[in-house]
Amino acid sequence: MGRPEAIAGEFLPGTLGLLILRALRAGSLHGYAISKRIREASGQALVIEEGSLYPALNRLLVKGWVVAEWGISENNRRARFYELTTLGRQQLERETVEFERLVDAIRLVMSTV
Amino acid sequence: MNWISELWRKLLFLSRREQFDAELAEEIELHLTERAAELQAQGLTPREAQQRARREFGPVSRAQEDTRSMWQWQWLEDVLSDMRYAARAMAKNPGFAAAGVLSLALGTGANTAVFSLTMEFLFSEPSVREPSSLVTMRLGGRSHAAWTEYEFLRDSKLFAGVAGIREQSEANWRNGNETQRLFASRVTENYFAVTGTGVTQGRPFGPGESDAVLISDRFWQSKWNGAGDVIGRVMVLDGHSARYPYHRRRRLVAPGDLGQDHSAAAG
């Protein structure tokens, strides 16, 4: 409905966390901005189900990879901004390497077998 | 130690749950508003934009539930809520609760009792050497036999061995300045040789040891506090001193005169 080109929320398991960490790499964002950033960066292909965005964000909070703080959004509204911690940056690097290995491996299989 | 700080964050969460819920609701509300504004900019009416934003988001309460669950130990919460429910239900209906508790207690008790008896009668080792070759004799159908009859039977060599026991007799035990009445059985000197009944400490008494006594485990524990040096102590029973207190599990055996009446065990 309305977004036929989107890959509906079912990414590879664990990639949502990686995408969120990546989206926060350049600076802190609030929840909606994170999903918007991912949607736009993927050319509208990756649409995060909002129902899974907040659980994923809170998992990152529990892990200590991001911290949250209330601030004022660009539209002058109170919003909760998420920011990467040092641990979060390390985790992003680790997961990026692993993700690239996985994608390379899948691509290899798809092109040879 | 990552898991420690993770645990700490989860514990902190418990103290600010209400705040958490309110903040999450505000966050989701903002999310919906921003999305609606964006859709509106794409040309939808405010009403349409709002409806579509909500539809895209999906059920808010489920998102809140899922988000909260990231901070919780779900199984622990489930157990606690089950227990609260059970406590409420029982407080509401104490009669039913009492019946439940009572039937559980009786059931457990009866089970334990049956199990103990079964273990004792079906699975415990017999305390005699060769149960299949042992018989109890009642001479002429009487429960007791005269000493002369016992002697006659013993000396007839019809059996490999004949031993006598006089059960349920009593003995007065002089313990310092006190005298206590004990329930004792008197046996012939060859009783242990014939039956092969074992003892847990010391040794069974044999021929010629007419002044020996065997005490039960319970007697050992209750009267002598399980002292390690009971073997060799002297017990004064009915005014006679008996040395060599031996001790085994159940029976108290104090040899002495068997008197005129006794029943006989033969093997």
Image: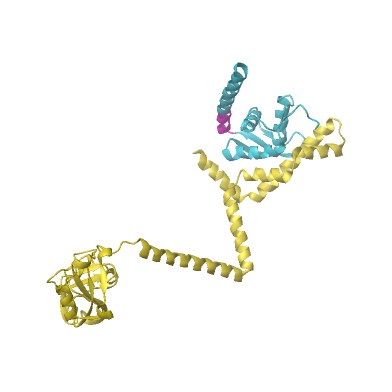
- Chain B's colour? yellow
Residue B32 location (% of width, % of height):
77, 39
Question: Residue sitting at 20 percent across and 67 percent down?
Answer: B194
Q: How is the image coloured?
A: by chain
Q: Nearer the viewer, residue B40 or B110?
A: B110
Location of the C terminus of chain B (image quadrant): bottom left
Question: Residue sitting at 55 percent across and 33 percent down?
Answer: A87
Corner quadrant of residue B220: bottom left
Principal SS element in the magenta part?
helix
Asked whether, in this view, residue A57 is left or right of residue B260, the answer is right
Residue A89: in magenta span: yes
Residue B246 location (% of width, % of height):
20, 68
Q: Nearer the viewer, residue A16 or B148?
A: B148
Specify the segment rendered in magenta: A85-92
Residue A86 location (% of width, % of height):
56, 32
Numbered disc total:
0
Q: Is residue B36 visible?
A: yes
Question: Residue sitting at 59 percent across and 20 percent down?
Answer: A109
- Chain A's colour? cyan
Corner quadrant of residue B8: top right
Corner quadrant of residue A105: top right
